[in-house]
Image (cartoon, rainbow, N blue to C red):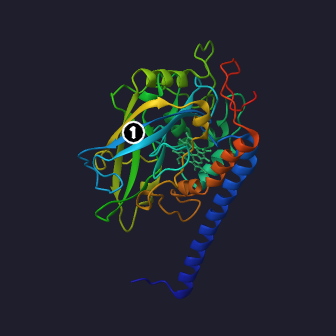
């Protein structure tokens, strides 16, 4: 039985309300600032500007061994639109985080389910507060950026070391993780949490991993001296590959039962769930057969708001809560819309040129 007095309860609930208000205000302000200062005037995404979109299908496993869910019913087929990207420089030969984002529709915006995934099993930040620190400590100069953050936050540095990929031979052979967990309430009504990943269907080994990354020079993402790969080599490789043979991925899911007194660490995207207790199971096979042009790739956008309620974002209570990362993302819709509006007002951003302006993150340099 609770031993708290009424005034202790009042203080507790007021504290929670204030925490939630701070989170809500921070998320709204951040989304608005992105829209007003970056997406609208500069016609840019917050990150991952350099990418290529493609289309195909996802077929859910015929005999799934993850908990049954009507949305992911056995054998169901979805049209998909994906986008592979490099965060955040406009140069494929740099040391970048690479991504695979999937929407279960062939539309640039609308879909019943989107998922965004990056390379690396851990992230570079773990809560809204940590994400703001990461964003504020970016000091980008010609391809060198997070030296201050890396020195102050060794966990963030370790995340960057695990996620960066240089000299990747193809977007197709990387492993992509959604990192943050989402809700999963299936046919049995039991509350669970889920993470998603994509791996190459042919089992090809992952390329681009630095086996011995430097602690002090991780912030240096510049191309190596005497680099022969062009600024767009990875997107060209993907176009050729898809034309020649297509690209195929195993999409997998990991589910974790929810309990009443949850250990918050299971929501921490810096902590990998134990694969023995919570194995990766095949969600389905995704086959890509057509790449899209620059215009359509640039228009394509993904959102954590595009999810059925039973597979959506886990509620967050404060800027310290691990789930506040996804809370921020739910409130960044305005940034996406502002970017799409900017093309209507000022025209589409041009494709990345094959010139020797290397190590750049901005158009016009
Ligand atoms: C926590 C793990 C996160 C992952 C795995 C992730 C992943 C991604 C990926 C892969 C993209 C590129 C999608 C594309 O190709 O268009 C992206 C874009 C973006 N992300 Fe995140 N992200 C994360 C956290 C966040 C957070 C905390 C925010 C804060 C608001 C955020 C806001 C955005 C925005 C605004 C875009 C650009 C959207 C657009 O203009 O189309 N993301 N993210």
Q: Whole-percent x and y of residue 20?
A: 59, 68
Q: Which residue occupies the foreground of this view, 280 or 4?
A: 280
For residue 184, say whether it is visible. Answer: yes
Q: Quadrant of the N terminus?
A: bottom left
Answer left or right for 340 relative to 82: right
**Which residue shows up at 28% across the image and 63% down it?**
188
Which residue is most to the left? 63
Q: Residue 297 lies in what quarter of the image?
A: top right
Label 1 sits on a secondary structure element that is strand
For residue 265, say whether it is visible. Answer: no
Q: Residue 51 lies in what quarter of the image?
A: top right
Q: Whole-percent x and y of residue 353?
A: 67, 22
Q: Quadrant of the C terminus?
A: top right
Instruction: Please give the residue where the numbered disc 1 appears in the rendered image.
Output: 57
Question: Quick check: which quadrant has ligand 1?
Answer: top right
Q: Residues within 10 Å of mark 1 (few under 14, many from 20)?
A: many
């Amino acid at each position: 039985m609770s031993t708290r007095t009424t005034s202790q309860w009042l203080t507790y609930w007021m504290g929670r309300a204030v925490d939630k208000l701070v989170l809500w205000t921070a998320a709204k302000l951040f989304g608005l600032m992105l829209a007003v200062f970056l997406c609208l005037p500069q016609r840019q995404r917050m990150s991952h500007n350099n990418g290529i979109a493609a289309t195909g299908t996802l077929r859910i496993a015929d005999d799934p061994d993850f908990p049954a869910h009507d949305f992911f019913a056995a054998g169901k087929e979805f049209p998909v639109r994906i986008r592979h990207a490099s965060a955040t420089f406009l140069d494929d030969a740099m040391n970048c985080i690479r991504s695979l984002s999937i929407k279960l529709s062939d539309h640039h915006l609308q879909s019943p389910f989107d998922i965004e995934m990056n390379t690396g099993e851990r992230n570079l930040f773990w809560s809204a507060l940590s994400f703001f620190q990461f964003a504020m400590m970016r000091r980008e100069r010609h391809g060198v950026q997070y030296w201050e953050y890396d020195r102050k936050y060794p966990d963030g540095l370790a995340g960057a070391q695990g996620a960066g990929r240089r000299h990747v031979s193809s977007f197709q052979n990387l492993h992509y993780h959604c990192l943050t967990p989402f809700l999963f309430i299936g046919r049995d009504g039991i509350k669970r949490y889920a993470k998603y990943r994509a791996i190459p269907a042919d089992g090809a080994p992952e390329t681009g991993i630095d086996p011995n990354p430097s602690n002090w020079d991780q912030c240096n993402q510049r191309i190596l001296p005497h680099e022969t790969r062009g600024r767009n080599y990875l997107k060209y490789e993907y176009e050729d590959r898809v034309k020649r043979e297509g690209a195929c991925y195993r999409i997998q899911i990991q589910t974790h039962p929810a309990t009443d007194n949850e250990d918050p660490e299971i929501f921490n995207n810096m902590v990998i769930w134990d694969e023995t207790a919570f194995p990766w199971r095949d969600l389905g096979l995704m086959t890509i057969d057509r790449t899209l042009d620059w215009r359509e790739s640039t228009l394509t956008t993904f959102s954590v708001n595009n999810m059925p309620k039973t597979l959506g974002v886990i509620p967050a209570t404060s800027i310290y809560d691990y789930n506040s990362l996804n809370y921020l993302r739910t409130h960044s819709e305005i940034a996406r819309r502002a970017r799409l509006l900017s093309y209507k007002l000022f025209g589409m951003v041009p494709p990345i040129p094959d010139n020797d302006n290397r190590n750049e993150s901005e158009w016009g340099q």
